[in-house]
Image (cartoon, helix red, strand yellow):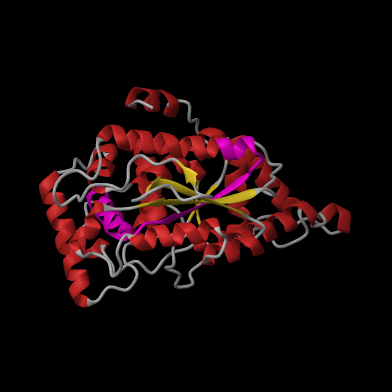
Amino acid sequence: MTETELKTLLSGITPPDEAARAAAHAHWAGLAKPLGGLGALETLLEDAAALTGSAALDVSRRAVLVLCSDNGVVAQGVSQTDQSVTRAVAENLAARRTSVCQMARTAHCDVVPVDMGMAGDPVPGVADCRIAAGTADFTQGPAMTRAQAVEAVGRGIRLVQEQKKAGVGLLATGEMGIGNTTTSSAVAAVLLGQPVEVMTGRGAGLSDEGLARKLDAIHRGIAKNQPDSADALDVLAKLGGFDIAGLCGVFLGGALEGVPVLADGFISCVAALCAVRFCPAAAKAVFASHCSTEPAAKLVLDALNKKALITAGLHLGEGTGAVAAIPLWDMALAVYDGCYSFEEGGIEAYTPQGGAGC
């Protein structure tokens, strides 16, 4: 996919369908319960209706896309493990043995591991969307070319199109890539104009010395590449990873295809931020799942104007937080589709009286 083709495709993303949102809101208001009593569970279904264009929602088929890639900046000692762990986890994703696989089984959710650019040979059972065998070390130059970033975004969009064609109505995002909290922090710091120290955490548990190396690498990467904060594609290409670029495409694909996309933690939300900077209308497809313990997680959610459903101190990755939110969608839909109405119960309908909860 070329950049011109991507821009043409994104021009097809339309604003939310406010009539469908209003229809979903009216349906909630007719159910025999306090108005707005389910809080965010009601608004998420209203938002989903606005995205899909229908107040009749079906998310019975769902999948978590776990995008895997390696990051050249690992050479700077920014993580406590080397790149071999990316491959090891990818192999276990394919064997359905990882944390997200167990959670997904409980949530009746398919797991789709995707190779966006891991080091080494392709892993059997992992979808091959690889751009290259890992990105370059961004302290030495751009992590990838602009053309590679565009292609990775395009492959993320195609993943959504394939899933929709297979009947999937709800997607969750996940990732696996040693060093990707470094790339995410770098991208977020530039896009939000925040100090690197504010946007950077310990990832998978760095020591003080490791955190210092991580901060130094990000500072050097920004100084070396001079990314343009007004051009999200430039920032993504110079400082990001193939996983982030692919996830950016997943959010854009969700907006194009009318498929809700549950953002996992900090890394997925940075990808969503890139998507919204590319195309503000794509925000309609972004549904926050949880607020991770990464220091900048809430800052990114605030920039997206999204509120997390879950605050549970999660910071595992793989899409675990996004999958953890799926049962909340199921319970919301169970009430939305199955609760009796005021009319059916012979109860006078509640009406808004003003004040909180109305």
Residue name at image x 43 percent, y 47 percent: 122
Q: Is residue 168 magenta?
A: yes
Q: Which quarter of the image is occupied by the C terminus?
A: bottom right
- Which stretch is magenta? 162-191
Tell me where residue 244 appears, x and y as whole percent. Answer: 36, 48
Q: Residue at point 51% right, 43% down?
A: 285
Q: In which quarter of the image is residue 103?
A: bottom right
Q: Could you say where residue 340 lies in the image, as x and y percent from the top left?
A: 82, 56
- Seen as rendered, the residue at the extreme bottom is 207
Name the residue: 50% across, 49% down.
126
Q: Quadrant of the N terminus?
A: top left
Residue 63 seen in render: yes
Q: x, y (%) of residue 318?
A: 47, 60
Residue 251: within the magenta?
A: no
Is residue 355 something that shows in the picture?
no
Q: Is 262 placed left or right of 120 in the picture?
A: right
Residue 338: where, in percent of width, then height?
A: 80, 55
**Residue shown at 72%/47% (left/top)?**
27
**Residue 27 sits above or below residue 315 on the image:** above
120 displayed left or right of 136? right
Residue 326, placed above or below residue 112: below
Q: How many labels does the image show?
A: 0
**Front in this rendered view, residue 298 or 212:** 212
